[in-house]
Image (cartoon, coloured by chain):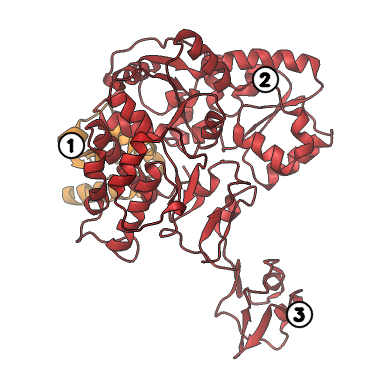
Amino acid sequence: MEPVTVTICMGTACVVMDGSRLVLLEEHLPERLRGLVRIRGERCLDLCTRRSAALAPFVLVDGEPLANATFESIVLRIEERLAGRA
Amino acid sequence: MAYPAQTTRIRRELLVKTATAIRAGDLPGRVDRFPLEMRPRRETALRCCVHRERAVLRYRAMALLGFSVQDEEDELKPLADYAREALVRGSRDPRLLTVIEEACGGCVRTAYFVSNACRGCADQSCVAACPKQAIAVRGGQSAIDPDRCVNCGKCKDACAFNAILRIPIPCEEACPVQAIVRGPSGRRELRHDLCIACGKCMQACPFGAVAEQSEVVEVLGALAAGKPMTALFAPALAAQFQAPLERLVGALRRLGFTGVVEVAAGADLAALAERLELEEAPFLTSSCCPAYTGLVEARVPTLAPRVSATPTPLAYAAGLAHERFPGVPRVFISPCVAKRREALAGAVEHVLTFEELGAALVAWGIEVDACDPGPADVQATDRGRAFAMAGGVAAAVGAQAEVLCGLGAETLRRLRLYASGKGPARFLEVMACEGGCIAGPCTLADPKVARRRVPA
């Protein structure tokens, strides 16, 4: 199966809103998702200026923006994507 | 970072709103609306209700404006009035931290609690174990009298059913100098005469009840007004953003700083001086972390004569900044609260924490990695830049060294060993924060991520 792509914004607003640790996502993936996720760090995705910096940190899961991202919410979204494909 | 995620986000959101209003020159006009905007009526509350959260936000804002929550005389005084006063005050409040009573959970009075797993056993071993007659069996279960309990824990050890729990009081446990204590209201109070400004209580409190008294109004206000200012940034700042150092320097200039000095350049000088000092002395311990030197004075004074007399990297950098830009106010960009104290003692004119700088960057719409790269006006070597992490000082001094992190019981045991002259190393580096300044209480990036960006 094609892996789910998670793009993590590493821009200034996302770091300021406590998103720096999201680049450690790999370590926080549950065993069942290993190998099913492709993780990329990106320069500012500009979602903070288009939406609101208060909604940072942002990630994209298969291109879909996720605001206020946490390890938990990212994992949930990945599972939804995988369920949608099955 | 040790901060609970929610209180960190709330604090930073408030910081960004404040910085945005300062930039727009309209802090008094906006600040009273912040609690309402951040907690609209329909929002689900983390605490009992939005009203309590708004009250906490109001006090958080008061601290951010530089005032002590404890000084409040009129609950109806608008934040706008505080904001106006902040704009004209001449000097800052010497107190660095304030307890937001509304936020404090008023943690348990005694650290021991008899749970309902207590069987009311015939042996009554807890009662027998208590040296203060603070525990008695009533209605078939043991109960602790908080007026008598001295928190020794003997009852817990005596219970055959593990029915007695130890409930920690996070701020008190984290404080290495017993400066945060239970006040008459049950909420915590800060003993400013004892506090060493390590910021551990602030990091530990799950209610986010300890807040910094900031000077964002002064510093960001001056930047917004286009007044000249020199930024002196701590080595750990370079590890916060996913961008090269030269772009970070560019970002500081875009924010309006007319001069940019790497405090790591001061660290280069401090390392040289400390190396020379060590040639003359049989043993030295590091002087750069003010929370550590504060701990030595408070808890292991016999070690104080062994603290290096070499000025801190900040003190050197302040001198360099003054030579390069005489008369221009200097702003130290700090990873921690303790350095605020050093600044107050006269090292520099102002302090902005990493968090506050980050909020300003967001408010000014500055993306660090998109800024024009350029060199700092006073540059450092990688040796000085490595002061950002524990071990950096020892490596630069180049002696047979031991490195300790944290201000807890383990560190104190080691310090007493060195004070007695029995320590194994010639140079002892101590950092108040686990991993060094990249883990400071006012940093932005997760230390696990930040450490990858510090020069080895």
Of residues B45 and B69, the one drawn nearer to the viewer in this rendering:
B69
On the image, numbered disc 2 is attached to which residue? Answer: B310
On the image, numbered disc 3 is attached to which residue? Answer: B128
Dot 2: chain letter: B
Looking at the image, the residue that sits furthest to the right is B421
Of residues B70 and B304, the one drawn nearer to the viewer in this rendering:
B70
SS at mark 1?
A: loop
Looking at the rendered image, the quarter that the C terminus of chain B falls into is: top right
Dot 3: chain letter: B
Looking at the image, the residue that sits furthest to the bottom is B139
The amino acid marked with disc number 1 is Gly
The amino acid marked with disc number 3 is Ala
Closer to the chain start, of discs 2 and 3, is 3
- Is residue B53 placed above or below A22 in the rendered structure? below
* Residue B98 seen by the camera: yes
On the image, numbered disc 1 is attached to which residue? Answer: A63
Of residues B314 and B449, the one drawn nearer to the viewer in this rendering:
B314
Viewer-side label of 1, 2: 2
Asked if disc 1 and disc 2 are in contact, CB closer than 8 Å, the reply is no
SS at mark 3?
A: helix
Task: Give the distance between the C-alpha atoms of the residues marked 3 and 1, in whole angstroms.
Answer: 66 Å
Dot 1: chain letter: A
Residue B26 located left or right of residue B359? left
- Is residue B38 placed above or below B221 in the rendered structure? below
The orange one among the chains is A
Residue A31 located left or right of residue B294? left
Say which quarter of the image contains residue B137. bottom right
Judge the density around disc 2: few (<14), some (14-19), many (≥20) Cα neighbours within 10 Å.
many
Labels 1 and 2 positioned on one and the same chain:
no
Residue drawn 51% across the image and 37% down it: B337
The percent position of residue B454, horizontal first and vertical second, equals 49, 23
The amino acid marked with disc number 2 is Thr
